[in-house]
Image (cartoon, helix red, strand yellow):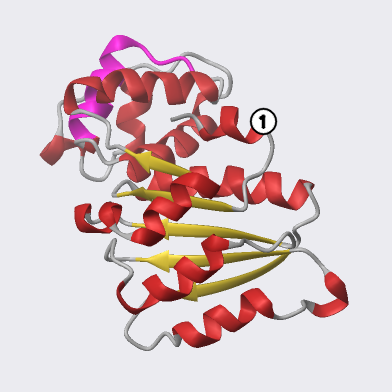
């Protein structure tokens, strides 16, 4: 699902963004945050659903008036993909979402059992679930090329091959290295030699570079 297209249709009261690719999850969250801020939801409150989280306190936030009646974003991170004690709280919230709050649930890949729970069914009726899937290994080089193009970078086939082998599907590392290449490229096409400059310290061990 393309979250950008959904956001163009207007904001929903709740978003669930789940997956095991930190970079793609983060980028989806950033798009929701920007759209929410543009709509006046400036105040943000963040919870992490670990064993210390008081879910009753979370529930109270949804019934409390925010300072100066500002619209708020409440983000809840679910590192295990399970809600546990938070299910009852979310069921109450999702039954009648407040107008002045946008809820963003940020989760690892959602536990299959959670999709059969009442809270998830409520969410499907009231909000948007954005499952973020990993990039398949055979599509990683194409993904890398597209990301480079989005940054205004042009890479030779050899440069792409070297980077793909080096990065082994690590999307976050790929994004960081494209940022570094942007500084080296200076508007020029990035070839094998330029890529090797990026890895000067360990090129001899990890990959074959031009002399």
Magenta span has 115?
no
Residue at 31%, 56% in the rendered image: 108
Taking the image as shown, residue 200 lies to the left or right of residue 102, namely: left
- Residue 141 is situated, as x and y percent measured from the top left of the image, at 28, 21
Residue at 27%, 41% in the rendered image: 170
Judge whether 88 appears above or below 28 on screen: below
Judge whether 56 appears above or below 126 on screen: below
Judge whether 18 appears above or below 90 on screen: above
Q: Which residue is mark 1?
A: 9
- Residue 128 is situated, as x and y percent measured from the top left of the image, at 50, 43
Name which quarter of the figure residue 155 lies in: top left
Residue at 51%, 70% in the rendered image: 92
Magenta span has 162?
yes
**Bounds of the magenta segment:** 153-166
Instruction: State the residue in front, 64 or 70.
Output: 64
Taking the image as shown, residue 169 lies to the left or right of residue 5, namely: left
- Residue 135 is situated, as x and y percent measured from the top left of the image, at 27, 31
Q: Residue furthest top?
A: 157
Asked if one can make out residue 131 in the rendered structure from this viewpoint, the answer is yes
Q: Residue furthest left?
A: 205
Instruction: State the residue in front, 178 or 89.
Output: 89
Total label count?
Answer: 1
Residue at 36%, 40% in the rendered image: 132
In the rendered image, the quadrant that contains the C terminus is top left
Name which quarter of the figure residue 4 lies in: top right
Instruction: State the residue in front, 172 or 53.
Output: 53
């Amino acid at each position: 699902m393309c979250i950008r297209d959904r956001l163009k249709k207007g904001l929903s009261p709740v978003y669930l963004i789940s997956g095991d690719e930190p970079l793609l999850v983060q980028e989806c969250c950033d798009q929701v945050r920007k759209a929410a801020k543009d709509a006046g939801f400036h105040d943000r409150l963040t919870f992490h659903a670990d064993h210390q989280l008081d879910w009753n306190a979370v529930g109270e936030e949804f019934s409390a008036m925010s300072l100066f009646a500002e619209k708020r974003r409440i983000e809840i991170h679910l590192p295990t993909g399970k809600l546990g004690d938070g299910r009852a709280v979310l069921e109450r919230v999702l039954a009648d979402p407040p107008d002045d709050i946008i809820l963003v649930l940020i989760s690892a890949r959602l536990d299959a059992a959670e999709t059969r729970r009442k809270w998830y069914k409520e969410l499907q009726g009231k909000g948007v679930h954005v499952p973020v899937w990993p990039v398949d290994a055979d599509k990683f080089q194409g993904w890398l090329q597209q990301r480079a193009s989005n940054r205004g970078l042009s890479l030779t086939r050899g440069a792409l091959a070297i980077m793909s082998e080096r990065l082994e599907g690590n999307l976050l590392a790929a994004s960081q290295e494209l940022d570094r290449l942007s500084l080296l490229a200076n508007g020029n096409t990035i070839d094998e030699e330029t890529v090797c400059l990026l890895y000067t310290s360990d090129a001899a061990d990890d990959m074959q570079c031009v002399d």
